[in-house]
Structures are given as C-alpha cells and as structure tokens.
Image (cartoon, rainbow, N blue to C red):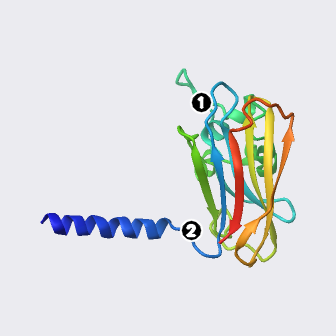
C-alpha cells in the first residue's frame, strides 16, 4: 500500500511540474524581489502593451494597488487613488479607473511575504485569452519605492521571435537610493 501511495504521489508531482513548466513560444519575465520595510513600498505591476501603447494583458499587480485596504471594515478604496505613486504608469496605461473589481481580480495578487525570484509568463494572448496579432509588444515591470520613487523596466518582443534573452531598459521617476534593491536582476526571455 505504501509503495502504491508513493508511486501515486510521484506521478502527481511530475504531472504538476509539467503543467507549471514554461511552454515554448511564451515570454518569461523574472526578477529578484526583496521585501522592503515601511510604507509606500512593495507595490509593483507586470504587463504587456502593443505597438500602439494599448495594454494587451496585465500579468500581475499587487493587491494594495488594485484593491486597497480597509482596517475599519468599510469598503476599501483602491490604493492608487490615495497613494498616487503606486505604479502610476500602469494605472494610466490600463486606465485603472475604468476596470471593474472583477476585472482587477483576474490579475491581482498579494504582495509576496518573502523575497525571492518572481516569474511571470505571457503566452501571447490578450486579457480575454485570445491570441494577439503579429507585431511587436512591449513588456513592463514597474515598482514603487518609498512612496515616491518609481522604477520602470521595459523591453520589446516580436511575435514569432526566436528563443533567447531580450534587452531590458531601466528608468526612474524621482530616484532615491533608499530601497532601490526591491526589484533587481530583471530578465526577459523568449522561450
């Protein structure tokens, strides 16, 4: 009985790893995340836009930014509405005020409690899960540090491009030296 259970667990683990493995043809975006102490940090978003600057798909945005927080039981106010430095490029480009709470739920997640490598995969589909048109797409990782300083990492990928690493450029808004190690080693690669 023990052998059968062990074999069953091994098969289940193998199937889970195969299901979670990145698929060839996808875009993988990864970075090292180090949780920061204090208010106004640990907010980030990962998304893809088309050549016209329209958001095609948001892969992730931190829960506080998208949903806010309520400590008194009232309905929370979205974090970006009262802390305007929360990933402002994503907020503007996606037109966050036009999104319903249900739409936000599709890509919102808790801020990681622990540091480590964060990995997101884009399968060249839009927010509805439909394949995108051939063309060039821009990937973004935006993070807010210390309530005001914002960093954006950006790269480009062409639909149908061969596998390989992609260059990623970094730019800052009101750069400070404090907490700049929240997101480091941003990588993008076509699988």
Residue 87: image quadrant is: top right
* Neighbourhood count class around disc 1 (C-alpha, 10 Å): few under 14, some 14–19, many 20 upward: some
If you read the primary sequence from the N terminus, does the residue marked by circle 1 or circle 2 appear first? 2
Q: Is residue 102 left or right of residue 136?
A: left
Name the mark on residue 69: 1
* Disc 2 target residue: 22
Determine whether the residue tagged by mark 2 lies in a helix, strand or loop: loop
Q: CA distance from mark 1 to mark 2?
A: 33 Å
Residue 56 x/y as whole percent? 74, 62
Residue 122: % across, % down: 65, 64
Kindly indicate the quadrant of the structure image that contains residue 140. Answer: bottom right
Left or right: residue 121 compared with residue 47: left
Q: Residues within 10 Å of mark 2 (few under 14, many from 20)?
A: some
Q: Is residue 159 above or below residue 177?
A: below
Q: Is residue 75 above or below residue 181?
A: above
Looking at the image, residue 135 sits to the left or right of residue 132; the answer is: right
Near-viewer residue (71 or 42)? 42
- The residue sitting at the left extreme is 1
Q: Position of residue 116 (x, y in %)?
A: 57, 46
Q: Position of residue 81 (x, y in %)?
A: 74, 33
Toward the viewer: 100 or 43? 43
Total marks shown come to 2
Classify the position of the C terminus by image quarter. bottom right
Q: What SS does tag 1 mark?
A: loop
Q: Residue at x 12, y 66 (%)?
A: 1
């Amino acid at each position: 009985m023990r052998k059968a259970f062990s074999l069953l667990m091994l098969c289940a683990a193998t199937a889970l790893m195969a299901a979670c493995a990145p698929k060839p043809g996808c875009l993988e975006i990864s970075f090292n995340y180090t949780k920061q102490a204090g208010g106004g940090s640990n907010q980030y978003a990962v998304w893809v836009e088309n050549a016209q600057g329209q958001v095609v798909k948001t892969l992730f945005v931190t829960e506080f930014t998208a949903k806010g927080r309520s400590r008194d039981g009232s309905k929370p106010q979205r974090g970006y509405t009262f802390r305007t430095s929360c990933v402002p490029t994503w907020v503007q480009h996606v037109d966050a005020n036009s999104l319903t709470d249900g739409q936000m739920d599709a890509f919102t997640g808790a801020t990681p409690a622990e540091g480590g490598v964060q990995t997101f995969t884009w399968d060249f589909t839009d927010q509805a899960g439909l394949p995108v048109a051939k063309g060039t797409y821009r990937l973004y990782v935006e993070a807010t540090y210390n309530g005001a300083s914002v960093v954006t990492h950006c790269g480009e990928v062409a639909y149908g491009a061969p596998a390989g690493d992609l260059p990623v450029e970094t730019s800052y808004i009101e750069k400070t030296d404090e907490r700049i190690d929240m997101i480091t080693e941003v990588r993008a690669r076509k699988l």
